[in-house]
Amino acid sequence: MVKSVHDMGGDPAGPIQRAEHARTLFDQRVDAMLRLLAHPQKGHFTVDAMRRCIESLDPQAYHDLSYYERWLRAVRLLAIERGLVGQTELEQRMATLAAARRAGA
Amino acid sequence: MTVHDHGDHVHHDHDHDGDAHPHAPVDDLDHYQPESLLMEQALRELLVEKGVFTAGDLQRQIDLTESRTPALGAAIIARAWLDDAFRAALLADAKLALGRAFDLDLANTPELTVLENTAQLHHVVCCTLCSCYPRNILGIPPAWYKSREYRSRVVIEPRAVLSEFGTELPAQREIRVVDSTADMRYLVIPLRPEGTDGWDEQRLAGLVTRDSMIGVSQALAP
């Protein structure tokens, strides 16, 4: 059986890097979105569902993305799966925001 | 990778929302893929517009998360050192004991198991699959806890890992590594340091570090 990318217990690895870094507003917002959506009383999805999404990222994406970027991909997928947002409207909003940024907003 | 090297980046304030905030983080968006920044903003805006949550809900959740620090864990450990009945209750049913003694509402949080270190047995907590951690007690996990290096190595060579944290345990002391899950979190009661007889709870709590409650180090010596 081939191990999935997230299942790294026992793999060889180098020294532990102990430097801390401040969480960015991006990190805080992604974290908060997950907490709000996964809160048991809201019940939009569970932490297990979130893990399923993160664990099914392709290995290259898993390694290239930062921790909260992986979370964001999972929250996006679950929000679409649960019908909270539409995939098309999300893509359209991203395109609108990208155009605004290019225009120097 | 989850550990970022900030290098010589100049830290600009990229937050254009203008919300001055006591927990305002240092923003350094150079780490992120441009698509991630667009995705976060688009998703957040749409969820707010659709009434799934409000901007206020989001800010309150951020504040709540940032307000949780290892100080709570340290107070719990100090109480456990002093109060045998509380320690027994904590080891038997941690969420119940904490709900009673610390007025914590842990109803919507994962199961919590408290593990007591002894002269014969030392516990170390990890999450090989992800980053599960008793956030309600200790706050946000340190970056190294989420790193590939810690997750990979601590389960096969805990003594070498502890050594990197400056922790050397007697060879005859058993080290037990526990792997957290989405549904089960762990908190370690470190050994109470010698030379602390007669100390009160607050003074003892000052010896309890975050890392000692994860098990990669011991409580501070007085």
Image: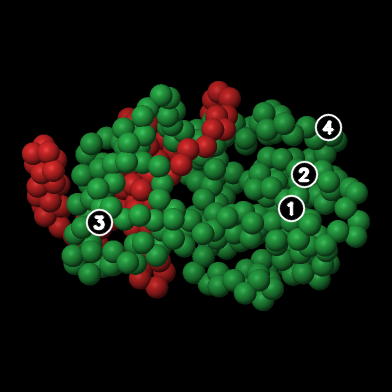
Give, as a three-letter code, the residue at label 3. Arg
Select label 2 or label 1 by which is in front.
1
- Which numbered disc covers residue B44? 3
Mark 2 or mark 1: name the one nearer the start of the chain.
1
Residue occupying image coordinates x 74% and y 56%? B205
Image-based side of B29 in relation to B60, left or right: left
Crowd class of label 3 (few under 14; some 14 to 19; many from 20; radius 10 Å): many
Location of residue A12 by image quarter:
top right
Give residue B113's position: percent from left, percent from top.
65, 59
Crowd class of label 1 (few under 14; some 14 to 19; many from 20; radius 10 Å): some
Give, as a three-letter code, the residue at label 4. Ala
Question: In this view of the protein, which residue sits in the foreground, B49 or B161?
Answer: B49
Select label 4 or label 3 by which is in front.
3
Image-based side of A6 in relation to A57, left or right: right
Q: CA distance from mark 4 to mark 2?
A: 20 Å
Residue occupying image coordinates x 83% and y 32%? B171
